[in-house]
Image (cartoon, helix red, strand yellow):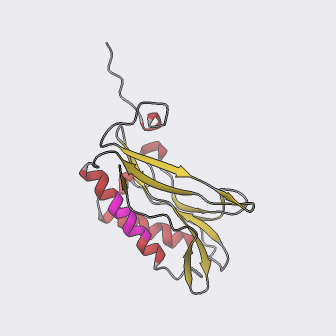
Amino acid sequence: MRKVVPTQSDYSVRAHPIRRDQPIVIDYGVGYNGYVTDETRTFVIGRLKSHFEKACQVALRMLAEMESSPGVGELPDHIYKRMQEVAEKEGLASNFMGYGEGKVSFVGHGLGLEINEWPILSKGKKRPLQSGMVFAFEPKFVFPNEGAVGIEVDFIVREQGLERVTEFPKDVVYL
């Protein structure tokens, strides 16, 4: 019998049953009065392996840094580069926002009537955040042949800083 080794793209709901101690990443959206949300949380039945736990803690640290951001006037390019630097410092740069050919160069995207709008928190994007913009911030880490972890939280840019759209807890949910 030939052994089948799953690839990054094989980690979907239909690829295999949920296993104990493997991260379960749920990306969900909700429509409200014509507008959309887009959030992600990590769940696990049992305990996460240490490298997944570390990546979750780094994602939460990135989120805390984003939450303390002034918002208005921030450049998406600078946000992305700061988060990339955190991933590098923690030894997780190769896993940050994908792996190999699946890696993307953004860490967030706008929300509104559609689930992907401006602003894009990406390398090279120089248009500053403005009051009233809404975006999803989503630091995630992918470990090939094992799974992924991360978080996605929605924010409204306000003059006095960023405001969270939802109140769902941010920590990993242990089942």
Q: Please, which residue is most extreme toward the front here?
A: 175
> What residue sits 70% from the left and 57% below the top?
114
Q: Which residues are magenta?
A: 56-63
Nearest the viewer among 113 and 92 is 113
Residue at image point 50% right, 60% down:
152
Rendering coords of residue 84 (x, y %): 41, 64
User: In the drawing, does residue 141 fall left or right of residue 160?
Assistant: left
Residue projecting furthest to the left: 50
Q: Across the whole image, how many numbered discs are drawn on residues? A: 0
23 w.r.t. 60: above or below: above
Horizontal arrangement in the rendering, residue 174 relative to residue 103 (left or right) = left
Identify the residue shown where x is 55% and y is 67%. 166
Q: Nearer the viewer, residue 92 or 58?
A: 58
From where the camera sits, is residue 141 visible?
Answer: no
**Residue in the picture at 75% in, 60% down:** 34
Residue 82 is drawn in which quadrant?
bottom left
Q: Is residue 57 covered in magenta? A: yes
Q: Is residue 13 magenta?
A: no
49 left or right of 174 in image: left
Residue 146 in view here: yes
Quarter of the figure with the N terminus: top left
- Residue 37 at x, y percent in the picture: 62, 60
- Residue 31 pos. (x, y %): 68, 57
Q: Nearer the viewer, residue 100 or 132?
A: 132
Residue 29 image position (x, y, % from top left): 60, 54
Q: Find residue 116 and report its image quarter.
A: bottom right
Q: Residue furthest bottom?
A: 160
